Amino acid sequence: MSPANDVAAASPEREFAITRVFDAPRELVFEAWTDPNHVDLWWGPNGFRNETCEMNVRTGGVWRYLMHGPDGVGYANKIVYTEVVQRERLVYTHGSDVEDDPTAFHVTVTFDQQDDKTLLTMRSLFATTAQRDATVAFGAVELGQQSLRRLEAYVTTMIAGNDPEGCYAEVNGLHLHYEIHGAGQPLILLHGGLGSTSMFGDVLPLLADDRQVIAVDLQAHGRTADIDRPLRYELMGDDIAALIVHLGLAKTDLMGYSLGGGVALRAAIQHPELVRKLVIVSTPFSQDGWYPEIVASMAQMNGAAAEFMKDSPMVQEYARVAPRPEDFPVLLDKIGDMLRHDYDWSDDVAALKMPTLLVFGDADSIPPAYCARFFELLGGGKTDGGWDGSGMSSARLAILPGATHYNIFFSPLLVSTVRPFLDASPPAMRRWGE
């Protein structure tokens, strides 16, 4: 996008206009603007979250929604459509449920096809010059530009969702690969070490049944090429935060397995303002969380193991999709170097505020007693939950039966455990007799 996209157009004394050119057909941009499954994921300035209560895009139709600010306050809005021309134009009055709302104003949005791009113009007309000037002084032009930039990023994810090869984001020097599946509340899904997005098997499409899953290939994994940088949980956590910002998402859900769980945990620790809910699968918060024999095995990992692993599924998948298949020994060296670094994030974990679900197997590489310690750090397991659930924290702990570290990431039980947690708002407590 050129800088000109962010410049408000000249307008008469009672109006202002903002424009943006989208590298997408206008049918797609119009769909993103008029489908509540899409619009709630981008509408509003940075840091705001939209919640549609009612949306009927037709002449005389109404769109009611709550705009939740960074402070958690919800602002009620009401839009009444006075003209709808499919894929070309929307005209509406923007106000509230207050009768004869004195703050209401009129908006015209046009979608003009320019070759394979779309020129969008959003023109706002006010009752008086004073009302227009006060709105501009409040920062409405910049806030509108932020919303259109979020729409641009979201349309990119819509295009990526239709591309089996996925999409790429330039973040922190990485050409970071991600795929989009489904629509709804975003969930960023992170794979385990030496794996890629494909390792989740049927779990990924099942999660995408009722939400938008953004599956990411981490540094040096899958379709994401390595760069001249060590592998570190903290750095990759920053990569995920940068991707969230790049995609223009408000608070999103994060779910990671093993290596990806550590990355998700660091992203939540380092950027809590970006995370709505957190799911950690088969991942400890400290090096001593693994069984001693697992720690010893990690310490031995290096590029020399590539020859012995050449017939394994993970090496075959790496060879199929990696930009440089010959770099697998380098990945082993970097993973081994990372795993030999001692760490303990217990203080950081105890400070987390977002609802968090911990999922482990009953035959995991992490002892059940340690899983309970993790749960307690998050505020869980401190007291009896109570008949009415009043003693429960926002943390949840699940131990899946018959699951190991090596099969939990494609277990059907994983989906049936994770989905209710992500869907609950707030976590519901059903009582006996109800």
Image: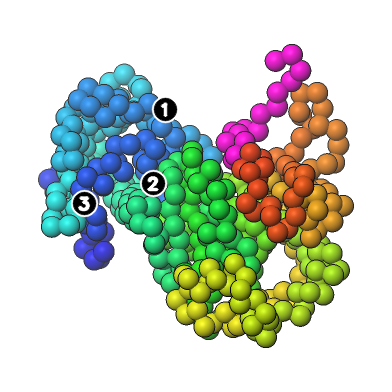
Is residue 386 toward the left or the right of residue 158 in the image?
right
The residue type indicated by label 1 comes to Cys
Q: Is 425 colored magenta in this rendering?
A: yes
The residue to which callout 1 is attached is 53
Q: Reading the chain from its start, which is encountered first: label 3 or label 2? A: 3
Residue 39 is situated, as x and y percent measured from the top left of the image, at 36, 40
Disc 3 and disc 1: Cα gap in Å?
Answer: 28 Å
Q: Can you say which quadrant of the picture contains the N terminus?
A: bottom left
Q: Amino acid at mark 3?
A: Pro
**Magenta span:** 419-434
Q: Is residue 251 visible?
A: no
Q: Earlier in the sequence, mark 3 or mark 1?
A: 3
Q: Which mark is residue 25?
A: 3
7 or 415: nearer the viewer? 415
Q: Quadrant of the C terminus?
A: top right
Is mark 3 in CB contact (under 8 Å) with mark 1? no
